[in-house]
Image: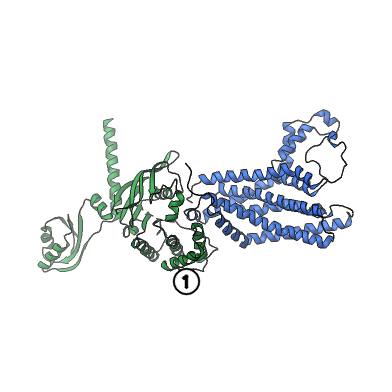
Chain colours: A blue, B green
Amino acid sequence: MRREGSAFQGVGVVTLKELSDHLTSVRMRVLEWLVVLVALAALYGAIQQIKDTTAEDPFLFLRLFTTSRDPLPSFVSFISFLVPLMAIGLGFDAVNGEYTRRTLSRILSQPIYRDALLFGKFLAGVATLAISLITLWLLVMGLGLLLIGIPPGAEEIGRCILFLIVTIIYAGVWLAVAMLFSIVFRSAATAALVTLGIWLVITFIWPVLAGAVAQVIVPIDPRYAALGLQTPGTVEAEHILARLSPSTLFAETVVAILDPTTRSLGPIYLSQMQGAVLGAPLPIGESILIAWPQTVGMIASAIVLFVIGYVIFQRQEVRA
Amino acid sequence: MSEMVIEASGLTKKYGAATAVDHISFGVGRGEIFGLLGPNGAGKTTTILMMLGLTDISEGGIRVLGFDPAREPLSVKRRVGYLPDTVGFYDQLTAADNLRYTARLIGFKKAEREQKIAAALERVGLAEFAEKRVSTYSRGMRQRLGLAEILMKGAQIAILDEPTSGLDPHATSELLAIIRAFKAEGVSVLLSSHLLERVQSVCDRVALFSGGRIALMGSVAELGREILGGGFVVDIEAEGAGLAERLALIPGVSGVERTGISKLRLHADRDVRPEAAVEVVASQGRLRFLGVQEPSLDAIYNRYFETRASEELAMKDRTRHAA
């Protein structure tokens, strides 16, 4: 039997309310300042480096995002660990907060489905992250224009916009993770700790671990080792394992998009390189094709995580 | 009570092997105040959640205003107001903003929204605190804000889960007054509580829950007659020679008991206050007090479970002997 009415009734109301809560919250203020300061620092380092070294780069503007100068990491690497923090900061008490405030049963006794509450919260979170990321992006673009003094070309702008979109998707993945744990754990503190723990493992430990696990699955072939080469099977296994982490997916996507000379994100054989002009940039369409699987992977993982949370939430008891 | 707004039949909720609500059936009429009473964990809140479609029904069925909450939850929730046990609001928002959010979820248009919110806050006496943040509210004010939400919704049924728990006597009586006003407007009220005495005064009928079942159901007076042996207890404080003997002769009086200095207690099968007064005056006694004891829910409840326990004990005895 079908249930009556639309699952989306009330989504807009919930989204707007959550969005206004986010934007007026102290938490958001702190995150915004953190991101702005960090971005400024990274940008400063990048511009110093660009002024010192690169003079004749056709994609000078993109270097703004990827160049780093010791001891500061590049803007992209800053973003790749600040975005998860922002998303977790917004999402870790999304559902269990309603339990602790004892508002859940009151809200759910209004003529809406639980779906609307969850969708609304997720959309509001994504919208909040998108607003801050777009602001940040405009800030970086503007400062870059002023400080470098060279306007970006159409393709560079296109790549920058793609970078922005991919970053928002990446934020969505971590928001889904945070919301999942906010559904599973009744205590907001537990949810926050577990989510942060998972973020640490996935971002910093998993890439190292993936190599070790890959060698167990496909042992290194001594014949390749004798030649000083990597075993193709092992490398492939390592890539597959590493790509389970959204951080890896994001890093690879960004490399493909912001560095036009990227031709492949996986292992490549010499035979495949025949006739290639090394170091020559690819057109934007080709770069998108290279980054496509990773991007789809991120979107898919966000959806899967959201669905798991959704199913658990539907089966959960409302009473506190 | 001609028209039933809530009808449950064989309603059951199981959590794995445990049965929280065990085949209960009851009906609530339009404009009636119905009390679900019983200790914590007796299945009252679970019953309420099934009524709102917020938890699955394992067996049996319930119809709320003719709708099935499991299949048509939106129709039910549009017409029913719910005040959860220790209701919560968004503390950082004002009372009016909290109600605005609910009003938007219900789908009221902007113009009627503002007018309804103002009217509802006025009714529960929170109009002057409308623009204050809920974090500054006391427990009693929050409960009243919860009632304001139900008023604003224009609900036909108000379901109140433990509305008076944790409130001081003054706040409780204020709350009960608002609940009585619901009845005056033809709104049916379903009230759950573990405080029997408090709700006794407002409920038309009650259902006493115990271990997921309805142990007793009916008006307090009916239950009193049924469980406490159908007698009336009249207390008299009067002085007069041979008063006890004279009172014992009143038709219908089955016993006279001395409860203190010049205090007597009559056990009778009807209300014998008029006759007792006549006797006191006739014996030229000085009448200081004359009153009939209302059956108390506490007494009914305790008596019922005492008898049940002793019956069970007897049962066990018998089976042991049989074995």
Q: Residues within 10 Å of mark 1 (few under 14, many from 20)?
A: few
Q: Position of residue A250 (x, y in %)?
A: 72, 46
Which residue sits at x=70%, y=61%? A33
Q: Position of residue B195 (x, y in %)?
A: 36, 56
- In the rendered image, is residue A70 in sight? no
Q: Chain of mark 1?
A: B
Q: Is residue B186 left or right of residue A165?
A: left
Q: Position of residue A227 (x, y in %)?
A: 86, 31
- Amino acid on which disc 1 is placed: Glu
Q: Position of residue B255 (x, y in %)?
A: 15, 55
Q: Total label count?
A: 1
State which quadrant residue A130 falls in: bottom right
Q: Is residue A141 left or right of residue A115?
A: right
Which residue sits at x=55%, y=56%? A14
Where A91 falls versus B142 (above or below)? above
The local secondary structure at tag 1 comes to helix
State which quadrant residue A275 falls in: top right
Residue occupied by mark 1: B128
